Every structure is written in C-alpha cells, then in structure tokens.
Amino acid sequence: MSVAKRDIVALEGVTKRFPGVVANDSVDLEIRPGEVHVLLGENGAGKSTLIGMLSGLQQPDEGRILVDGEPTAITSPRHALALGIGTVFQHMMLVPTLTVAENLLLGGPWWQRPKTEELEARVAEITRTLGITVKLHAKVSELSLGEQQQVEILRAMVRNSRLLILDESTSMLTPKGIDELGALMRRLVEQGLAIVFITHKLKEAAAFGDRISVLKLGRKVGEIPPERFRALGEQAIISEIVELMFGKQKDDPEAAERPVRTIRAEAAPLLEVRDLAVAPTDDAPGLSSISFDICPGELLGIAGIDGNGQKHLAEALAGQRATVGGSVRLQGTPIEALSVGERRQKGLRYLTDDRLGEGTVGTFPVSINFFLKQVGAAPFWRKGVEQRAEIDKRAAQLVREYDVRTPSLKTPVARLSGGNIQKVLLARELAEGAKVVIFNKPTYGLDLSNTLASRQRIRDTAARGLAVLLISTDLEELLSMCDRIAVISNGSLVGTVENADDARTKVGRLMIGLAA
Amino acid sequence: MSIDTAPAAGATALDATAAVATRRDIQHRLLMTLGPILAALIIAGCILLAVGVDPLAYYGFVLKRGLLSPLGIQQTLTRMAPLLFLAAGLIVAFRAGMWNLGGDGQFLLGAVTAAASAPVLVEVMPAWLALICSFVIAMLVAMIWSLVPALLRAYQGVNEIITTLMMTFLGTSLANVLVKLMFRDPGTTVPQTRTLPVEDRLPRLFDTTITSGLLLGLVAIITVHLVMTRTAFGLKLRIVGANPRAAIHAGLGVPKLTIAVFAISAGLAGLAGAVDILGVQGNVRADWNPAYGLAVIPVVFLARMNGFAAIGFVFLLSVLSIGGESAARRLGVPNHFTLVLVSIVLIVLALAEYIDHRYNQSRKA
Ligand SMILES: Nc1ncnc2c1ncn2[C@@H]1O[C@H](COP(=O)(O)OP(=O)(O)OP(=O)(O)O)[C@@H](O)[C@H]1O
Ligand SMILES: [Mg+2]
C-alpha cells in the first residue's frame, strides 16, 4: 500500500477486538491536512473505537498507525497530544469538581505553576473566533452538557493540535452553534489543520465535510473522496451516504411529515406546572415562574440554547432538584413535595441526557441497568430476592425490541457504544406504567434509523394518551414532533407557539430575544 | 420508516467463547493474587534479614504455630470469629462506597457492653438467653455510636473517613473509661470488667478449643455476601456505591440507605466485639485494644469485597497473627510485623495491577 507523504495520520489494516465483537475490522483511513474527514456509521459501527486508538486510549490488535508516514505506537493520551492529536470525546472527560480554567490547565508539567494569564489570553482569542462564551471560573459540574462540550472543544484547540478529532460534538449544540462550528472547522482546515468529524446528522456531513468514510459493523464500506464530494450536490451526497450506510435509498429521510393528531382539548391537563421556581446556583441561572400545561396525548417541546435552565427544569419536575416555589400537579394531585421515587410511582418518567453520569451505572451489566429504577419490584425481585431468570428474560426482550447492540446481557453498560447506551435508557423509560414523560435530548447520539425509530416511539407514546415534555436543542426534531413549542431563555419561558407553518421563524425570533 | 437496520447481535450467541474466557480470567486472577503474595513474603523476608532474623526460621515458626500445630490451628480458627464479623461489616460499607474506618471504636464499645451485661444477665436468666441479649446490646450500642458519622454523611455530606476515624479515637477512650469507672470489677485489683464464667460462654466446638463463634462469623459473612449480591437491598447499596448520582436519579432514598449502611456495618463490628468477649476473653481489661478493625481493612481489599474470598484471607490473617504472636515471643520480632507483612502484600498487589495494565497496553502496541 502506498501512503502519500502528505497524510498527517494514516491507518493501515487496523483491527480492534473486544470480548464478543470486532469493533474495527482492518480499517484503512487517510487523514490529510486541509481536510475535514467525516466519519459516519450507525450506532456501534466502531467510530469511537477508531478515535480511541488515534488518541492513545486504546491500542490496535492488528495493523498499524502512521504519523507523518512513520509507524507510531500511540501509547497514551499524553503521547497523542504531544503528536499534535487533540480529541473531543463523545462522553465528557472533564473533572467535574474543578473549574473550567483548571480543567484547561490540567496536563501541564507538574513542576510549573499553571500559567493562568497566558491561558486567559489564549482562550479569549479562541472564543472570539469561535463566537462562544465560556465561563472560565465556573465549576464544570454546574455547566450543562452542551457548555461542557464547548469547553472540550476549547481544550483541544488550546493545545495547538495539528489534528482535531470531534466525536459527536454537535449533538448538544443548537442549529446556530452547529453552523458556527462548521465555519470554524472551515477556517481551521484552511490554516492547514486536519479534522476528523463524527456525526449522525447527514446534512452536517454534506455541509462541512471534504471527504467521507463510512463504517459498518467495524468495516469501512465506502469513501467519498474530495473530488467526487465537490462534484456531487448535497442531496446526491446524502442519498449516497444513506445507501452506503443502510443499503436503501430515500431522498431526505429526516423530512418526515408530522402526522396531524387530534388532541382532546376538553380533557383535563395531565401535567400542570404553575410558577415553578428554582434558586440560581453560583454559575447557573435559576428558574423563575415557569408555568405550562400538557394535555393527554400532547407533545410540548422546550426549545432553547443549552444551558438556559433546561436541565434544572427537568430535574425540578423529576424531583431531583429542590424548588423554591410553585406547584406541579399530575392528574390533578400535587406532586411537588414527593420524592423522586414517589413521583415515578405516580407515573412520571424522566429520561436524562447524562447517560453515563446519572443514567446508568457503567460497571453494572446491561440487564441490571434496564431495571435501575425498579429495584425491588416484582417480578424481577420477589420478597427482595433477585430473580435472575426474569430479569434476563425481560432484558433480552428489550434488547431485541430496541435493537440494543451488545455482545451479551452481562456486558458492563459503559462498554456499549454511545448510541446503544441511549437505547437502554429509552427502553427503560418507555416501558410500562408511564403517564407523563420528560425527554431530555432523547435522540442524542442515535444514528439516523434509530433516531427515526425513537421519534416514532415518542409519538406513539403521546398517541397512547400520555403527556410528553420534549426538551431538545435540535429545532428540526421539535418541529417534526411537537404540538406546541415553548422557548426557554435564562431560566424562564419567553413564549409558546403552536407548531404551525410559521413556527420555525417564530421560535427562532423568540430564541434570539425578539417577540414572536 | 423505510430504513432497515442489520439484525441485532444475538445476546447469547457468544456464551461458549465466554466460558473459555471466564476460565482464563479466573486463572489470571489467581496468578495476580498469589504472585504478589509470594513477592511480598520475599520482600518481608529481606526486611527480617536486615534486622537480623532468619526469615526462613520466622516463616517456619509462623506456619508451625499458626497452622500446623493442633493448638495453633485451634487458636487460629478461634481468632477468625471476630475478624469475620468485622470483615462482613466492612464489605457492606465498602460496597456501598462508604469508608467506615471506625471499626475499632465500634468493636471495643460492643466488647465492653457485652462484657458488662453478660455476667449480670446470667444471674437472672438462662445462659443462652443472656448471651443473645448481650449480643443484641453490643450491636445496638455500636449502631448508635455510628449514628454521628452516618447522619453527618447522609444529610451534610461530611466525609465519613474523617468522622469515623475521629469517632474511633473517642470510642476507644470511652471504652476505657467505661471499664475503669463504670463496669470495673470490684473483686480484683487490676482494672477490668467482671469475668463471664467459662461454662456460660459460647460453647466450644466438639472436643476442641475452637469457639462456636467461628460458625456465627461464617454465617454472618456469607449472609452479607448473599444479601449484597442477590437481593434488591444489596443492589441498592451497590448502586449508591458505584454511582451515587445514578442512585439519586433512580429515586433511591440515599440518606436512609446511608444510615442503614452505617448501622449494619457498625452493628457487625459491635457483634465482633461481643463474639470475642462472650466466646474467648470473658472480660475486658482496661487499655485492651487488639486493633482488629484496622488489620481487617486490607484483607477486605485483597478479597475485592467478595465474602467467600474474604473468608480465605481472614484465615490467612489469623494464621499470620497467631503465628506472629508466638514468633514475637520466641524470636523477638514485634507483634506488629504481621501488619507490616499484610501491608507489603497490599502494596505489591497494587503494583502488580498497575504493571499488568501497562503490559496489556504495550503488548497491543
Ligand atoms: N471498552 C470496550 N469494551 C468492550 N466492547 C467495547 C468497548 N468499546 C467499544 N466496544 C464495542 O465496540 C463496538 C463499537 O463501539 P463504538 O463505541 O466504537 O461505536 P460507535 O460507532 O462510536 O457508536 P455510537 O454512534 O453509538 O457512538 C460496540 O459494539 C461496543 O459495544
Ligand atoms: Mg461513539
């Protein structure tokens, strides 16, 4: 095989096996300066594993990695950084108890005092070009996941990387943020950087990429080189990708029509929230006088830039966060004084967006993670004793139903790919007994077909007469699913619009602070 | 939805290869446990050499006195009783992610209350009932003693490592004060509690000197193991230990569970004190503090908080400490050398783990 000298990094026949799966199967990949190399593939296709090897987290079982044409064993993340490879991982890698600045300074030589002033100047410069604001002195645990993602991008940039790897870094950004990131990537490759960009949104791939590689079940099944890329239009690229990934063609798979549902308007609201308030913390705005109703069968969306109180709202409703006022009624009964478990008993479900932080126990098997919120409940526990057979039976059923790709039910859930962990959460919250479901970014990290399937499931949930609150930064998602969309900004709802033809512009205006 | 996905990977298709992998895993685990122990023995041997003791003579003596002589093995098995209770208590706490390092204070308070109550109770009720009552009293006192760190951790988030350690200093002092001022036996000149007559103590097993407390200890630790691995309660505790945020998210009552963990852990430590007094010692002398609680901590780590493995390691610790006590008298090596040995094992084990990890990484590079 001839490796062009100009590749910054090249993979040759790289194979990586894990117990029960071949995550990468002799993959070849060339990463060139001046190119955005988009890596696509369904959940569990092996994208993050490939990135893990480039960033020194893991070592290939077979094959080799060439850096500047030289075979190199990238032995640790530190080594990768020294080689100029900076990575933004799919799951957050920041230290939650430290401030943003401290996180950015981590990894410097231990005998030197951290150069705070230098950092501040550098950050100011980068954030200006990026068009983002980062609270340098906020504690990471107080930031929303979207803000943390920005910090991660910033961290990779502060290190002067030659190769920047972004693993699903747009999953938490708003459409505007995504466009900005795209423009930034363009500027960076023009300066001669190489970028590897992983996403599940095909439009982003077509809009930001120069070269596309598609993985399927660990194998590279196709590549669109820059020459062809430029020759094809966006639609042609997308349909080619869809064909490579799923083997079937469809023009714009995401443009699903929103079915017109009839909501029984006369029915009493299932969820009534009045003047809900949460005290602000040091770094995050609180909530002030949040009020809304959701009727049975209704889907209410919450739009807004991440970090404007969405997480507080979800946690306050679920009972995980103390409120300072207001009332929450479920089917007419007040629940604001109940604990998390009691609210769940009453039929309230909360799908968190922090799947590894609080959604799962990473070291526990997949099977147990399905039932984390039902510990002790029959038929999985009888008289407090675990019924392994019942658990495994039901877990196997859910694995099949939700298409969770896992080597076995005993596999620790953290070993699954990001999208597959998300499926475990979805399966857990959508299973029986729900009346009101709060979805916080339900499809984040899911591949196209799973996104579509999950959206359909959520629609079906509402159609069964449940009340659904859908929090998302993805406007397309909200527009394709919701009956009404409320916009949250700085901890309060600044307006609610019916999801009719002009909803997009109205929501957009509300989001930038104009009246709808 | 017109887009097909490939069929899901069969969840059971790989069980056959998994069995082979499990066997290799167990072999690896054994090697990774026994290897470091051997290395630690060699290192400790070098230390002995350095202080002028023949390591082979020392180890031989320890083995003979702790394991091979009939009297020694009986003493070893008897010593296991309190250690098993303590280990059981630590397993509960550590699996729930709570570092109860106050075992010694809880142990001594349990011992003193058992020693104070049993001789009085036998005079008013049958011996077996008196024993049971003493056990219960010892357990309750230790539980109450753990309430301070438990409440602080549950509702204020105060780190329990610090509070339990402080409480253990207070507890040992309090136990001493109780012996000297409140429960002192007026019939003797040495400060100690009244002595429980030998015939009223826990029965011995068959014709040996082994206390039946050993059986109680085994029951305790096996029960704890099963509860932690097989029940909903145990799973809840493990969730709290493995990911406290997930526990809150899942709606578990974390503060109540925290208090329960401390109560169980301390209760078992109190029972350990009681079983030592009611089975072996018969009374508590002032300033008596065998410091079993601290010695058991590394053992529980070595066993990776597995109850059955802990039984094996507790046995080992018993052999070492009984043999070590004899060797101390004979060869002049201080008693505490046992602890030195155990901690060397622990350090070598940690190193082995690190090297193993690095080796796995570089082999694949
Ligand atoms: N540390 C690990 N141990 C065992 N199996 C693993 C490990 N990491 C990944 N895998 C497995 O390797 C396969 C590929 O996972 P990977 O995370 O690379 O997928 P992905 O393409 O990033 O998917 P997603 O889009 O869902 O993030 C999956 O089947 C996963 O279960
Ligand atoms: Mg991934």
Image (cartoon, grey):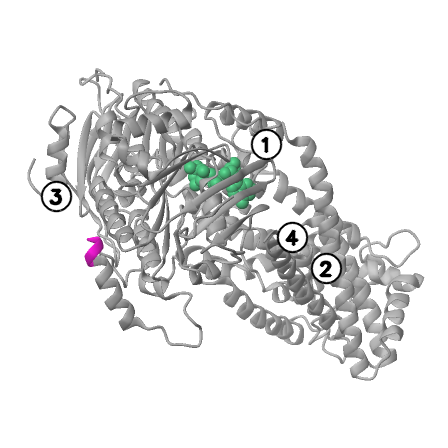
Distance Cα–Cα, label 3 vs label 1 = 55 Å
Rendered image: mark on residue A512? 3
Q: Circle 1 marks a residue in which chain?
A: A
Quarter assignment of residue B265: bottom right
Residue B19 in the image, given as x and y percentages of width and height: 71, 36
Decide which of B298, B1 is in the foreground and name it: B1
In the image, the segment drawn in magenta is: A128-132
Secondary structure found at label 4: loop
Distance Cα–Cα, label 2 vs label 1 = 30 Å
Marks 4 and 1 on same chain: no
Q: Which residue is mark 2?
A: B83
Q: Which circle's residue, 3 or 1, is located before the other in the chain? A: 1
Quadrant, the N terminus of chain B? top left
Decide which of A17, A419 is in the foreground and name it: A17
Q: Which residue is mark 4?
A: B305
Distance Cα–Cα, label 4 vs label 1 = 25 Å
Pointers 4 and 1 in contact (C-beta within 8 Å): no
Marks 2 and 1 on same chain: no
Decide which of B120, A79 is in the foreground and name it: A79
Q: Is residue A398 magenta?
A: no
Give the residue drawn at x 46%, y 58%.
Answer: A80
Secondary structure found at label 1: loop
Q: Which amino acid type is shown beneath numbered disc 1?
A: Lys
Q: Which amino acid type is shown beneath numbered disc 3?
A: Ile
Secondary structure found at label 3: loop
Q: Which residue is mark 1?
A: A383
**Left or right, residue B352 beside residue A89:** right
Q: Nearer the viewer, mark 2 or mark 3?
A: 3
- Bin the neighbour count of mark 3 within 10 Å (Cα to Cα): few under 14, some 14-19, many 20 and up: few
**Left or right, residue A362 beside residue B77:** left
Residue A172 in the image, given as x and y percentages of width and height: 30, 43
Secondary structure found at label 2: helix
